[in-house]
């Protein structure tokens, strides 16, 4: 078998090539998908490193004893996704951007199996899922859904659901919601990827991301061939001067409740951000990941409502119902709608129609509003329990970002530092936590603002991002006590 070679002419990555053998022997109808999946995994795992040159489609097809068309299709698909790059007469190579697409182990798998205590943010309380109401809606939809709606759906989504979503988003989030510009997606991850592909098709190769911010944004845009450019976050939101200096024309933002710092963008910063978008003919990609959960007053309205032609808005039911439903929405500027819908069509031919009809009924009957109120009460109680427990077991701790959302930032007094020692001790005690520094971009060189604990000279305070939504109140107090004993005992 002809192995791949690195761009520097190094040793062949034969172990990576062996991953393709099971795919080549898969059943005929699944062979193409299996080959693509095996190639993706080889790239993601690093067995095929950036800069590795792949064999020609003819040579690889001969080695694997499959058709050349199968290999060509796999190369083309992974090139479109950003895993590979190619040029006329120059061969096919593993893309350089893929380095950023391999997140740290905890980035996309927030839970910590086996931990005695788990404060890793990212998951709601799944026991709050409204099983009875969901089952009743499921039965009703199965009885009433016309046969024709079980065919291939409109790639934008069922009109009934888009109409219900438009009403919900306008009412709760202040969004300018035209059902014709809403696309039903399988969560914010797919919405992000769709936007990435359209940005790439329009000639953009970079996208700004908040620093600190969600690692998923960088990884998902990298899969579409875009390089993430870190833009610092200060006490009011994205710092606009560094944003202008970055040269990007698209930027991801979480203005209602910035992740992970927990701040809400100030009115001034929102205006500055939109002024920037207009001045560069750019776009703000608004991730409203937990915008419905505000505890001190009514939720801050979405940025999109201020300028729907320069903001693409996305959200999902991952925090309000369950991430396993893979159900979300994307609202795009009018000039983007056609391109996004066509990309959605070629990606998966549309979201499952039965799931859409079920959620539409759930919205229409008020079940979703009731679920949001139920979650609001539960998460407020857990937030209060966390603040009280930190005050008892870590006196002097500054807690911020608690006006909204499902996590808090805890800045412990210096006596509990340095942070490396603190994290080592709580890990030994079986407590899973994430420091704020984990959400900063390692390659970003800037000072000030919400720097995730990277700057500050001799400041050795422990800064933690504590997720509390998935932990019952009684367990929150016990888990904080366990963490305190680990570092003071």
Image (cartoon, rainbow, N blue to C red):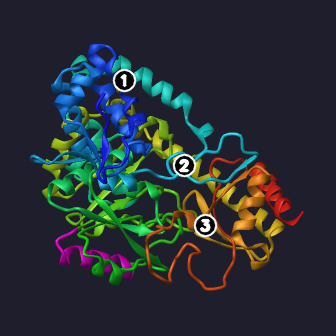
Name the secondary structure under disc 3.
loop
Task: Please tell me in which quadrant of the rendered image residue 11 appears.
Answer: top left
* Pick the front one: 359 or 185: 185
Name the secondary structure under disc 1.
helix
Using the image, determine if residue 342 lies above or below residue 29: below
- Stretch of the chain drawn in magenta: 268-282
Q: Earlier in the sequence, mark 2 or mark 3?
A: 2
* Pick the front one: 119 or 91: 91
Whether residue 428 appears in this view of the structure is: yes
Q: Earlier in the sequence, mark 2 or mark 1?
A: 1
Q: Give the residue pinned by disc 3.
A: 402
Using the image, determine if residue 469 lies above or below residue 158: below
The CA distance from mark 2 to mark 3 is 26 Å
> Any magenta on residue 270?
yes
Task: Please tell me in which quadrant of the rendered image residue 34 appears.
Answer: top left
Checking the image for residue 21, the label placed there is 1
Q: Give the residue pinned by disc 2.
A: 105
**In the image, farthest residue toward the left:** 88
- Asked if disc 3 and disc 1 are in contact, CB closer than 8 Å, the reply is no
């Amino acid at each position: 078998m002809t192995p791949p070679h690195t761009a520097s002419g190094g040793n062949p990555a034969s172990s990576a090539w062996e991953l393709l053998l099971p795919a080549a022997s898969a059943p005929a109808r699944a062979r193409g998908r299996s080959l693509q999946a095996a190639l993706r995994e080889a790239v993601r795992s690093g067995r095929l490193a950036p800069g590795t040159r792949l064999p020609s489609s003819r040579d690889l097809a001969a080695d694997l004893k499959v058709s050349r068309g199968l290999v060509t299709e796999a190369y083309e698909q992974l090139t479109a996704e950003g895993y590979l790059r190619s040029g006329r007469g120059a061969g096919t190579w593993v893309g350089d951007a893929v380095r950023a697409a391999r997140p740290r182990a905890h980035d996309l798998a927030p839970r910590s199996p086996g931990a005695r205590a788990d404060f890793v943010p990212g998951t709601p309380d799944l026991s709050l899922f409204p099983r009875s109401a969901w089952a009743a809606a499921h039965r009703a939809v199965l009885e009433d859904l016309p046969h024709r709606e079980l065919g291939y759906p409109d790639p934008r989504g069922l009109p009934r659901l888009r109409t219900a979503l438009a009403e919900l988003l306008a009412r709760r989030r202040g969004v300018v919601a035209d059902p014709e510009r809403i696309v039903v997606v399988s969560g914010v991850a797919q919405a992000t990827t769709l936007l990435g592909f359209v940005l790439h098709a329009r000639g953009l190769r970079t996208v700004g991301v908040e620093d600190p911010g969600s690692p998923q944004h960088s990884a998902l845009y990298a899969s579409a061939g875009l390089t993430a450019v870190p833009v610092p976050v200060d006490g009011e939101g994205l710092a606009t001067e560094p944003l202008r200096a970055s040269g990007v024309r698209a930027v991801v933002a979480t203005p209602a409740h910035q992740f992970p710092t927990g701040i809400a963008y100030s009115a001034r910063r929102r205006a500055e951000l939109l002024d920037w978008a207009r001045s560069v003919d750019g776009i703000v990609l608004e991730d409203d990941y937990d915008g419905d959960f505000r505890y001190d007053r009514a939720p801050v309205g979405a940025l999109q409502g201020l300028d729907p032609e320069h903001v693409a808005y996305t959200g999902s039911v991952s925090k309000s119902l369950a991430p396993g439903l893979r159900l979300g929405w994307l609202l795009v500027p009018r000039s983007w709608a056609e391109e996004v819908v066509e990309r959605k069509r070629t990606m998966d031919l549309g979201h499952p129609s039965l799931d859409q009809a079920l959620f539409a009924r759930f919205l229409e009957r008020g079940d979703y509003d009731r679920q949001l109120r139920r979650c609001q009460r539960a998460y407020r109680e857990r937030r209060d329990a966390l603040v009280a427990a930190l005050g008892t077991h870590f006196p002097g701790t500054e807690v911020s970002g608690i006006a909204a959302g499902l996590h808090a930032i805890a800045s412990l007094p210096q006596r509990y530092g340095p942070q490396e020692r603190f994290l080592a001790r709580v890990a030994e005690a079986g407590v899973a936590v994430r420091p704020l520094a984990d959400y900063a971009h390692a390659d970003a060189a800037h000072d000030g603002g919400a720097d995730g604990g990277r700057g500050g000279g001799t400041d050795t305070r422990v800064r933690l991002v504590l997720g509390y939504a998935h932990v019952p109140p009684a367990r929150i107090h016990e888990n904080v006590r366990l963490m305190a004993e680990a570092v003071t005992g």
